[in-house]
Image (cartoon, rainbow, N blue to C red):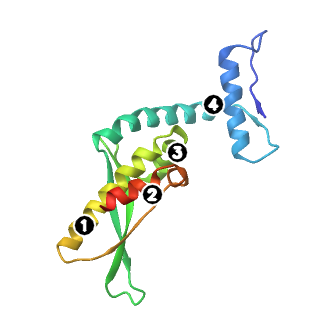
Amino acid sequence: MGIAVTWHYNGNTPRSLNFADLAMYAAKQSGRGRHAFFDGTMREGALQRVNIERELRDAIPRGEIITFFQPQMNIDGIGIYGVEALARWNHPVRGILQPRDFIEVAEHSGLIEGLGESVMLGAMRQCAAWHKAGNPLKISINVSQLQFARSGFVEKVLDGLA
């Protein structure tokens, strides 16, 4: 349950309802049967998420989501057997952003499919280039549960591999 205390004689103003909604979402994140009172940090967090979503909508088609590769070492520490593809956002103002700064927003806003496809195809292109250059490495690509569950996912992977 979300609770917002207002100082108006009529608490059913749009603003107080929005504040109660923000508190409700905070309560849901802490578990079932919980309640939360609205505070200003909830509003700031919501504004940040809205801004990230707006910027991310433009970032994906502009190619700002880039793929980094983390080496996977052999257990003896000698040699690399593969790489893990990692999404990063090359933000034009804030620089390179880590997944914790945008992946959750992408999942909640429905942008994760385009973002994940961009990373997956970029990783597949790089893997093909490495193979062609005589460096056959295995590649691991993280996939969002939402992306994995979408119909047509397997076909997109097969198309990318082709």
Marks 4 and 1 sit apart, C-alpha to C-alpha, by 49 Å
Contact between labelled residues 2 and 3, with CB atoms less than 8 Å apart = no
- Of mark 4 and mark 3, the one earlier in the sequence is 4
Q: Position of residue 159 (x, y in %)?
A: 34, 56
Callout 3 environment at 10 Å: few (<14), some (14 to 19), or many (20+)?
some
The quadrant of the picture occupied by the C terminus is: bottom left
Name the amino acid type tagged 4: Gly
Query: Above or below — where is 17 with respect to 85?
Result: above
Name the mark nearer the viewer: 3 or 2.
2
Q: CA distance from mark 4 to mark 3?
A: 24 Å
Q: Viewer-nearest of labels 1 and 3?
A: 1
Alpha carbon distance from label 2 to label 1: 19 Å
Q: Secondary structure at mark 1?
A: helix
Foreground: disc 4 or disc 1: 1
The residue indicated by pointer 1 is 128
Pointer 2 residue: 154
Q: Which residue is mark 4?
A: 40
Query: Which sits earlier in the primary sequence, circle 1 or circle 3?
Result: 3
Image-based side of 112 in relation to 11, left or right? left
For the point 75% across and 15% down, the residue is 7
